[in-house]
Amino acid sequence: MKNMNRNSRKISPFSLINTLVLLIICTLFLIPFFHLLAKSLSGAYPVIRGEVGLWPKDFQLDSYINVIGNRQFRNSFLSSTFLATVGTFISVLLTIMVAYPLSKPYFKGRKIILYAFVISWLLTPSIVPVFFLIKNLGLMNNLFSVILVNVIYTFNMLIVKTYFEGMPESLSEAAQIEGASNLRIFFTIIAPLAKPVIATITIYSVFGYWNSYFFPMLFISKPHLRPIQVYIYELVYAAMGSTSGNISDVASKNVSSIPDVVRSTSVFVSIVPVMMIYPFAQKHFVKGMLIGSVKG
């Protein structure tokens, strides 16, 4: 018994090498992260002179106060929140409702619809017809235009379809014998059992809508409707244009006018909501990522 416990505690060379490699990769990702954080919390002179490493110098919060206290920032934050909540809800709901019938071999026209999704995914139309479609629908300067163009992502739909295909058919058959309708079977039996895959595509959708930049730039021209990523771009662009002159002139201004400080602060302000959401869904996300690796 003692020998078994000793053998179980031994670390194999592969596990050791794997752990070291992962630690190195994590370190390479964390160094730029902490460097940007240090810049966002440092004063003007250390940042301009390139003296800031992984620890802030001349600690200050002026840049955060300037970014968060701006009215346009609050409007942009609300726009991104709307996209990440309403857009994700609509996208996830439609995705799972499309994937469920496509997972059934007896569904008529299944292959044709699947081919249509895959072809539209591989042969993405150019932006010109998409722009005119949104314009003709009267959705310019409307946040639903951003939701519409990303409402069903084929990759997410295929993930959900694969998960549904791995569920036993006896579940729905037993419910049908009891007289349950297809909608009731889906929402009361199938959907609750599909929490891991739903959590996975929910995270994907939240990240996608929160980080949306290109389509809002095309479809939304009103400043108060533009999401936070567009606001950050405009903020950094304006800050870069305001730094003409020598170091003394730049440093004499508010620290929030320094491009590196503005850029670093904007990055952290934009990723804080994502960092707060991910830990709560991590357990289901890990399970969802393993979908299709083992099928019964």
Image (spheres, helix red, strand yellow):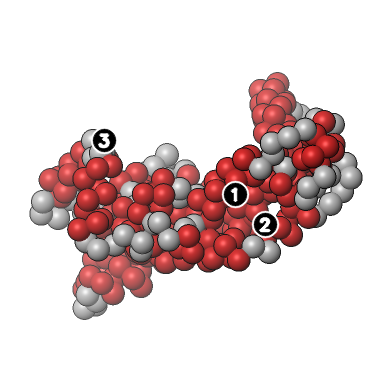
Classify the position of the N terminus by image quarter.
Answer: top right
Mark 2 residue element: helix
Task: Report the amino acid beneath label 1.
Answer: Leu
Task: Report the amino acid beneath label 3.
Answer: Leu
- First of labels 1, 3 by sequence position: 3
* Distance from Cα at disc 2 to Cα at disc 3: 39 Å
Question: Dot 1, crowdedness within 10 Å: few (<14), some or many (≥20)?
Answer: some
The residue sitting at the left extreme is 108
Q: Is residue 26 above or below residue 182?
A: above
In the drawing, what numbered circle is on residue 79?
none
Task: Report the amino acid beneath label 2.
Answer: Val
Identify the residue shown where x is 34% and y is 71%: 187
Which residue is under mark 1? Answer: 235
Question: Dot 3, crowdedness within 10 Å: few (<14), some or many (≥20)?
Answer: few
Q: Nearer the viewer, residue 232 or 56?
A: 232
Q: Position of residue 291 (x, y in %)?
A: 42, 45
The residue sitting at the bottom extreme is 179
Q: Nearer the viewer, mark 2 or mark 3?
A: 2
- First of labels 2, 3 by sequence position: 2
**Do the residues under discs 2 and 3 have CB atoms within 8 angstroms?**
no
Identify the residue shown where x is 75% and y is 46%: 40
Mark 1 residue element: helix
Answer with the quarter of the image where residue 61 lies: bottom right
Identify the residue shown where x is 10% and y is 54%: 108
Which residue is under mark 3? Answer: 122
**Do the residues under discs 2 and 1 have CB atoms within 8 angstroms?**
yes
